[in-house]
Each structure stands twice: as C-alpha cells, then as structure tokens.
Amino acid sequence: MTGVDISYAVGSRRAVAAAVTVDVHNLRVREVATAEGDITFPYVPGLLAFRELPLLLEALGRLERRPEMLVCDGYGVAHPRRFGLASHLGVLFDLPAFGIAKSLYLGSHAEPGLRRGEWTPLTEGDEVLGRAVRTQTEVNPVYVSVGHRISLADATDLAIALSSHFRIPEPTRQADILSRQVLRESWRGMT
C-alpha cells in the first residue's frame, strides 16, 4: 500500500511530495520516494489535483517497485465533480485508489459511534459519496471515499486497518512526515 502527501513552504511556491509504501500486515515502511519543486498551478478549491499531481507523479515514479494500491490525503468521488485526487491518481496508474481526508469538504453525515471502526454514510442528497469513519475510539472521524477500482467497504476496512495507532492511516501519515522533513531540510539549505 502506497500513501502520498505533499507539503508546502509557507510564503513560497516550493513544495515536496512524498510516496511511502508500507507493508499492510505490519505497517512497516518498505520504500520511500520524494520530489521537490515549485507549484505552478494556483490554489483553486476543487482543483487540488491539478496543483499537486505533477510532484506526486514524480515522487511515485521514483519508487523502485510499482505500487499495488494508492491511498491519498484527500478525496476520490466525495468531490464536487466526483473526481478528486484519489480518482486522478487511480486512473492515471490504473490502480485501486482511495482517499482519506481529515476534514469534511462537502456532503453531510450523522456522527458515527465513538468506537474505533464505527462509521456513517457521507451523503449529498440521496447520493452516498463516502463514509465518516472512526479510526480511533473517541477521536474525530476521517472521511473515506473511493477513487478508482475499489469498493467503499474495502476502502473503509483498509482505512481502519491502516490506522492501528493513529487517526490517520500509516501510509499517508508517513508520507506527511517525510514531505515535511524534506521540506524543512531543503528550506534550511536555501537560507
């Protein structure tokens, strides 16, 4: 399972993307890759994939082993156009992909039960876009949505399995840590 995330330098166009592959059975990191560069696409709500894809694709391309599945810090079909970052990456790589977001972007949901593994549908009108999932007992839920070639039930099960110690699944958590670390080191080297 490969997680991706990107970190931005405050007040700059500089960013670092990270791809981290973990073993699903023990959550140990197997491989990492990063890519640094300037972001050229402006921040436009709903068009995050166009801003982040170039560096994410570069980081994923630097992995020695092709990912088997992708998990993104973001959304798949729970998106105004029903095609978020997880959908873009899944289609481009023709891999199963899903998104796990930390905050609600659109739709609504009833509050899931307080125990780890409980969830409620994330909906907009009559359409189910994903699930609000409690990955840790008495911790805010995350928002799981399908990107490409995976069912919502499987994406939910994986979100829970990959979040055995933290609210955020280990692949994207490690990608976030790595991208921030490389960005800090790079920024220090530039000053």
Image: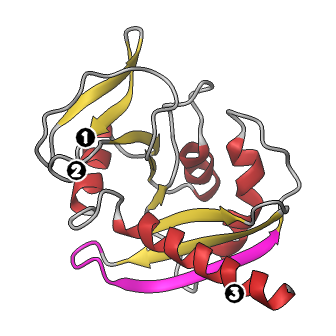
For discs 3 and 1, the disc positioned in front in the rendered view:
3
Residue 1 seen in this snapshot = no
Q: Is residue 101 above or below residue 167?
A: above
Q: Is residue 13 left or right of residue 121?
A: right
Residue annotated with mark 3: 185
User: Quick check: marks 3 and 1 in contact, CB under 8 Å?
Assistant: no
Residue at (32, 33) in percent of width and height: 131
Label 3 Cα neighbours within 10 Å, binned few <14 / some 14-19 / many ≥20: few
Which image quarter: residue 29? bottom left
Q: CA distance from mark 2 to mark 3?
A: 35 Å
- Residue 33 part of the magenta segment: yes
User: Quick check: marks 2 and 1 in contact, CB under 8 Å?
Assistant: yes
Mark 3 vs 1, N-terminal side? 1
Task: Tell me which segment is drawn in magenta.
Answer: 24-37
Q: Residue 59: which numbered mark, if any?
A: none
- Residue 124 part of the magenta segment: no
Q: Is residue 115 left or right of residue 150?
A: left
Mark 1 residue element: helix
**Number of labelled discs?**
3
- Residue type, label 1: Ala
Which residue in the rendered view is the most extreme toward the right?
40
Residue 188, how many percent across, how many down?
A: 76, 87
Residue annotated with mark 1: 153
Q: Residue 157: which numbered mark, if any?
A: 2
Mark 2 vs 3, N-terminal side? 2
Residue 143, how many percent across, how many down?
A: 38, 40
Q: CA distance from mark 3 to mark 1?
A: 39 Å
Front residue (pair 164, 145): 164
Residue 86, how many percent across, how many down?
A: 54, 48
Mark 3 residue element: helix
Q: CA distance from mark 2 to mark 1?
A: 6 Å
